[in-house]
Image: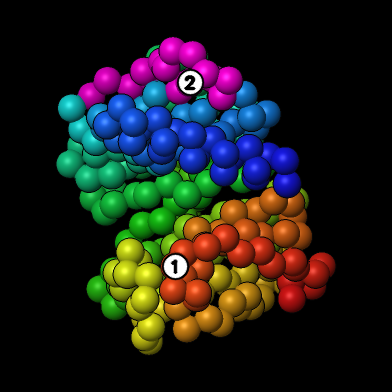
């Protein structure tokens, strides 16, 4: 809970500073011990200490790079970048250096999270793109290799619980997420996949959009919902059987 509160505070702080100085700082991400923030600015990946100080630019490229995510040990940052015409997955040391390209598909690969085994989880459109509009969920090792689809269901924003048991993700069709008052058949809900039983279960059933799940611990999940008419933070507790 402390880490989640720190992340929310940092998110507000980064956006407040950006508003005051007219800087568009986007997609803040906190490392494993809360000491370092990664973010996207002017299409490159930067880091800054959470206590303040001078930001360090990790990538320099004409292409747009975003969605930085720290590895569980805090030593690497994975991100999505359009260096070769569409978003691929890259990884770079938090100390800097040359980013390593991991995916080479012509589809958009948008990073979501890491698992505890050093695999990067991302959303893409590959096998089902002729019949399904929502994304598929894939993973790839941070050391490279062949990516693989890890869910039979399609969805967005997959994130694995700390113990590796559950994958929370968003199901629903394509709809304008920024429209907080949207109510319709394409609304998005939070779903859960149990890697032990291989079962899927729906956690939310609001008529509005429920998005961006984030684990506090392996049995507590936070998400945003516009059920009240505006996006607010919600919490759901999960039992050991995934209900």
Magenta stretch in the rendered image: 47-61
Inspect this view and state whether residue 79 appears: no
Residue 50 belongs to the span the image colors magenta: yes
Residue 120's label in the rendered image is none
Q: Secondary structure at mark 2?
A: strand
x and y percentages locating residue 190 in the rendered image? 55, 70
- Near mark 2 (Cα within 10 A), the count class, few <14, some 14-19 or many ≥20, is some
Inspect this view and state whether residue 16 appears: yes
> At 20% across and 32% down in the image, what residue appears?
63
x and y percentages locating residue 68 in the rendered image? 44, 36
The quarter holding residue 62 reads: top left
> At 30% across and 27% down in the image, what residue appears?
21
> Which of the two labelled residues, at mark 1 and mark 2, occupies the earlier sequence position?
2
Per the model, the C-alpha gap separating discs 1 and 2 is: 31 Å
Residue 230's label in the rendered image is 1
x and y percentages locating residue 155 in the rendered image? 45, 67
Along the line of sight, the residue nearer the viewer: 175 or 93: 175
Residues at circles 1 and 2 in contact by the CB criterion of under 8 Å: no
Q: How many marks?
A: 2
Q: Secondary structure at mark 1?
A: loop
Q: Quadrant of the C terminus?
A: bottom right
- The rendered magenta stretch, by its main secondary structure, is classed as loop
Q: Is residue 67 above or below residue 138?
A: above
Residue at image mark 2: 48
């Amino acid at each position: 809970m402390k880490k989640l509160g720190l992340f929310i505070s940092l998110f507000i702080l980064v956006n407040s500073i950006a508003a005051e100085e007219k800087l568009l700082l986007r997609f803040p991400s906190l490392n494993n011990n809360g000491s370092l923030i990664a973010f996207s600015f002017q299409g490159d990946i930067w880091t800054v200490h959470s206590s303040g100080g001078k930001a360090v630019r990790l990538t320099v490229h004409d292409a747009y790079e975003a969605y930085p995510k720290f590895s569980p040990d805090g030593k690497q940052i994975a991100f999505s970048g359009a260096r070769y015409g569409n978003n691929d997955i890259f990884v770079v040391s938090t100390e800097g250096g040359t980013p390593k390209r991991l995916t080479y598909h012509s589809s958009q690969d948008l990073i979501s999270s890491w698992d505890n085994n050093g695999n990067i989880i991302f959303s893409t459109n590959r096998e089902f793109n002729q019949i399904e509009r929502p994304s598929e969920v894939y993973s790839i090792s941070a050391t490279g290799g062949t990516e693989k689809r890890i869910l039979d269901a399609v969805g967005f924003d997959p994130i694995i619980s700390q113990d590796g048991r559950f994958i929370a993700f968003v199901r629903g069709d394509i709809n304008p997420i920024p429209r907080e008052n949207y109510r319709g058949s394409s609304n998005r809900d939070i779903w859960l996949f149990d890697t032990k039983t291989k079962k899927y279960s729906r956690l939310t059933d609001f008529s509005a959009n429920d998005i961006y799940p984030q684990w506090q611990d392996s049995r507590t999940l936070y998400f945003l919902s516009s059920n009240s008419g505006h996006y607010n933070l919600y919490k759901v507790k999960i039992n050991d059987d995934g209900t």
